[in-house]
Amino acid sequence: MDIASVVGLLAAIGLILTAILIAPGSSLMAFIDVPSFLVVCGGAVAACMIAFPLKSMLGMPMSIKVIFLNKAPDYGELIKQIVSLAETARRDGLLALEGRISEIDNPFIITGIQMAVDGTRPDAIEDIMRTEMDAVATRHRDAKAVSDQMGRFAPAYGMIGTLLGLIIMLGNMSDPSSIGSGMAVALLTTLYGAIVSNVFFLPFSEKLGFLNKQELLGMEIAIRGIMAIQSGENPRVIEQKLRTFLPPAVRAKMDAEK
Amino acid sequence: MDIASVVGLLAAIGLILTAILIAPGSSLMAFIDVPSFLVVCGGAVAACMIAFPLKSMLGMPMSIKVIFLNKAPDYGELIKQIVSLAETARRDGLLALEGRISEIDNPFIITGIQMAVDGTRPDAIEDIMRTEMDAVATRHRDAKAVSDQMGRFAPAYGMIGTLLGLIIMLGNMSDPSSIGSGMAVALLTTLYGAIVSNVFFLPFSEKLGFLNKQELLGMEIAIRGIMAIQSGENPRVIEQKLRTFLPPAVRAKMDAEK
Amino acid sequence: MDIASVVGLLAAIGLILTAILIAPGSSLMAFIDVPSFLVVCGGAVAACMIAFPLKSMLGMPMSIKVIFLNKAPDYGELIKQIVSLAETARRDGLLALEGRISEIDNPFIITGIQMAVDGTRPDAIEDIMRTEMDAVATRHRDAKAVSDQMGRFAPAYGMIGTLLGLIIMLGNMSDPSSIGSGMAVALLTTLYGAIVSNVFFLPFSEKLGFLNKQELLGMEIAIRGIMAIQSGENPRVIEQKLRTFLPPAVRAKMDAEK
Amino acid sequence: MDIASVVGLLAAIGLILTAILIAPGSSLMAFIDVPSFLVVCGGAVAACMIAFPLKSMLGMPMSIKVIFLNKAPDYGELIKQIVSLAETARRDGLLALEGRISEIDNPFIITGIQMAVDGTRPDAIEDIMRTEMDAVATRHRDAKAVSDQMGRFAPAYGMIGTLLGLIIMLGNMSDPSSIGSGMAVALLTTLYGAIVSNVFFLPFSEKLGFLNKQELLGMEIAIRGIMAIQSGENPRVIEQKLRTFLPPAVRAKMDAEK
Amino acid sequence: MDIASVVGLLAAIGLILTAILIAPGSSLMAFIDVPSFLVVCGGAVAACMIAFPLKSMLGMPMSIKVIFLNKAPDYGELIKQIVSLAETARRDGLLALEGRISEIDNPFIITGIQMAVDGTRPDAIEDIMRTEMDAVATRHRDAKAVSDQMGRFAPAYGMIGTLLGLIIMLGNMSDPSSIGSGMAVALLTTLYGAIVSNVFFLPFSEKLGFLNKQELLGMEIAIRGIMAIQSGENPRVIEQKLRTFLPPAVRAKMDAEK
């Protein structure tokens, strides 16, 4: 579980709720209005349904789950595995890798090793793996785009709701005492739009972009590793090459573990 | 038909209408003002007529039709067809493809196969197909640009309308009781601009961008497939290469169908 | 003449004037204030004079003339001419093109054909033509940049004018009855800024961008055609290659005309 | 001197001053408030001091001087000089250029010619000259970045000042008659921010971008010319190549001067 | 220590404090509200915790320390060291560099020299060093991204806080005398958001971008130098090449020191 995301989301919601509850003369009820909520959230979802294919919209819950349940990849472990495969390949030949495929749980690496074992040409392997990597990046970009647009349409529908409320209020000014409460209700949609955008979808979008880069880095390391294994490079050189992708802290940890 | 787009558009309009109808002291009539509507929509269309050639403006209804009536491409079917053509080419030679052209309904693939049958050089085929693909991308970008600008000019003309209304109202403040209703009318154009932009053209623009990427992906698969057919590659290898363009779910479905 | 641009501009101005004239209690005079106009337009022009070289500013009237007086290029005619030159070159040799230069009215093509006739090396021809194309793109980008900045500075000076007006008004609140009219005058500059930007310069900027792409497409077709003529390609193949740059509708029209 | 920049700056300031002076009930004194000025300008400078190294900040006066005192480069003269050097090199050999270095006043060309005379390899010359060109572009970009950020921070500190003023005013509403003047003072910082940004730094930033492109174009012409001289190209061909960088008007003027 | 950053930050804070203290009828206490502060800062931190991995958030204090404690790199010294290594390599062979590694304190250069001494192939050395450089750029970009988002979320949470305050105030308008102070408190969060963004995180973000470019320039010089040393280039030529990366002022200073 991604503790920081969960704590961040709870903290953001908690801070806003606390601010409402401790303010003198305030009550949570004054901040709850179902029609306002429907205009903002329903409107943003509706706009995204026009803008994206149904499949992308249905993928949103999955994307959100990934934001909170992702596990940080262990690049050090990945490099160790590649180096170990490289040692097998050097000692016993590329075909010997076939017996080790069952140990690997990363399907991207399995595909690459399988192709190397089958004797596929190096440029064909790299081509296929990079196309796969591009396809993953495209799918991630699509998921991020939905979150981005939710973060943009929510405040827009918040503004539409506030304009609706203001126009209704301004057309009923015979009772001046109701102006304040009318205006308060009108502003609720702007508030909802700002919260939906800044507590949920804009941070989600940033995180999806980060998770994408993280996964692509792992794929890049895997591609470089498999290409190096196939060309029969020295496992020590492979390790050194792949380690340059890691931040110094992780490298130091890897050295300490040895 | 693209159900999600239709449902999204109806939902967005329905939510706004419902919000108006259920609000106490509100009436739909208070939200209808023809001159305000003309300033916003007419203004945005006029600005786009200055900004774009007439042909692009006349293409808008077609683009909007595509948004609601597009059919999701069946990439799996496309790959199957290419693999089947590759099998024919491998078994009976490239010339045998001529007899199969009548089965194909995608004019882009027909052009490519025809050139391969005619013995056009591979780099010339790729050059012509990529130029065609670029031209399609350019036309799509133009259509998207019109929608983008409609989505930007509509709120701008909404603001112009509101400023007009405010200045008229501020010049006639002798009757304070009319201030509220004058202000309400003035805000209508801002509301119209926000709706035209966020319910229609900004989501349309996103969708046109998505449909463009979708069509270009199909063309990319076709180009890669035809180049591979011409170079006499193994149909199994072609299938594996082209499948990397598909999301894992589609691939799993393809495997299940076998 | 570019009918759409003229109609668009007249429509945008007409809509705003009509909205002013039909509004009850409104008069056109209330919307005319020469000092406000000078702050907005003079300010935007002054800012652009700081930002751009005098030559770019003096080129603005020319750019605006092009927006309204441009003629859509006939790419079909262009391709026909190139194919006809290719036929001459194939039949009678490259030198025979010299006799046909007088028929051509496009100076860019003349330069290219002349170099081909002179026996300039293909890569030198392409290099010179592409540099020329880049230079045209740069000049267009500069013209577009002036229009862009006019469209950005006009609302900024509109805001400066409104702030000036508000501060003067707030310093003279002894007579409350004048607040409304003071505020109305203050808002005029914001209105002017929005009109100057959204009726004139932002649409102009978009159109200049479009006209640039249009001209560059013609130049690209010319370069590809001349390179193909020089390398002695088959005129049919040249036609097929160049036609891929055209939208399907134009191609169908070309076929129908045959 | 860059007349347009000076006239533009004086015109922008003059228009704003005139608008203040001719407005009824207005006085220049109402627009002068030293603490407000310090918050906006001091704040923007302070933010830029955090954001940029001291050296970049100290370079600002120099950048501003260049904006007003730059001289338009004479590309025609530059090309003439290169062609003349090419003639010498063709007639008397590359070494003969050594005797002409003293005539050149452009240090960038001197470096290039010196290297050619010294027999440095062409790719090394191009490499060194392009690195120098990149370094110039980077330094210009840094100068432009300071101006950009001044143009962004000034309105931000204007808003901070206005918020400070509003909060102070709202906390002292016991005397309603002072609300107007309190608000007027509060708005002054927003006005200052808008002026500092739109009269000074945003136009400056645009101009610095333009001057950068202008200088880089001269360097590009110089690099191309020196590479062509070293490879012993025909001076006429060099002239034709380099002239493609110039706008048609400049070329026509060069022809007329011959 | 980076004096400019420290002075800039103190000046920005000092200007705002002074503006508060010297305003008539103002007191610092009116600007302090802990719940408002928590909504803005807590909210921005919470949003960033959702958006970024915990590691990036924990790296923030380190990034801020670097902003204030960084030391300007001495590129001249760096080039001198590389030239001196090149002289050793030319005189005594690449292996002689091993004895000089202990003098070097830049780990990036040590890695490169070590690989050169070990006889690693030049393209492998460049590949490893560039990957390392990309990894450093990525880590810097991540740090900058956190600062960017803090600078964006702070005003957003400021607006959320102000909307909360306005809605509470509008719901309690029975006592008109409290409107002013209610509004003042509501505006505090907008003020805090603007200060957190424009005094702290937006300038920090700019500076982090600058420091990144500075470090990468040093790494670029090191890579070019080591590649040149390994290929046995003349130390004078290496010096000339590397100096093109420096601004003219630094070069003049280097010459003066000789």
Image (cartoon, coloured by chain):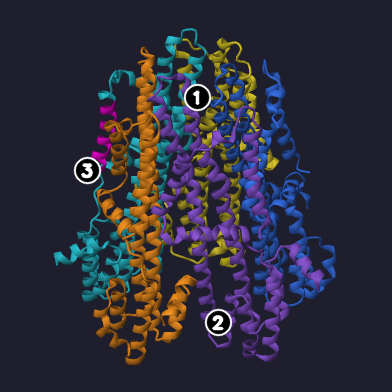
Chain colours: A purple, B orange, C cyan, D yellow, E blue
Mark 3 Cα-neighbour bin, 10 Å: few <14, some 14–19, many ≥20: some
Residue where numbered disc 1 is placed? A180
Residue C4 covered by magenta stretch: yes
Q: Is residue E28 left or right of residue C244?
A: right
Q: Is residue A49 left or right of residue D149?
A: left
Residue extent of the magenta highlight? C1-19
Residue where numbered disc 2 is placed? A122
Q: Residue D42, image x and y in percent?
A: 65, 29
Q: Is residue C195 visible?
A: no
Q: Does residue B241 sit above or below B43 in this rendering? A: below
Check residue C3 in the rendering and tell me which mark sits there, or answer none. Answer: 3
Q: Quadrant of the N terminus of chain A?
A: bottom right
Residue found at x 59% / y 58%: A67
- Amino acid at pointer 1: Gly
Mark 1 vs mark 3: give the one in front.
Answer: 1
Q: Does residue D214 sit above or below B108 in this rendering? A: above
Specify whether disc 2 shares its chain with disc 1.
Answer: yes
- Amino acid at pointer 3: Ile
Check residue D73 in the rendering and tell me which mark sits there, or answer none. Answer: none
Near-viewer residue (B20 or A29): A29
Mark 2 vs mark 3: give the one in front.
Answer: 2
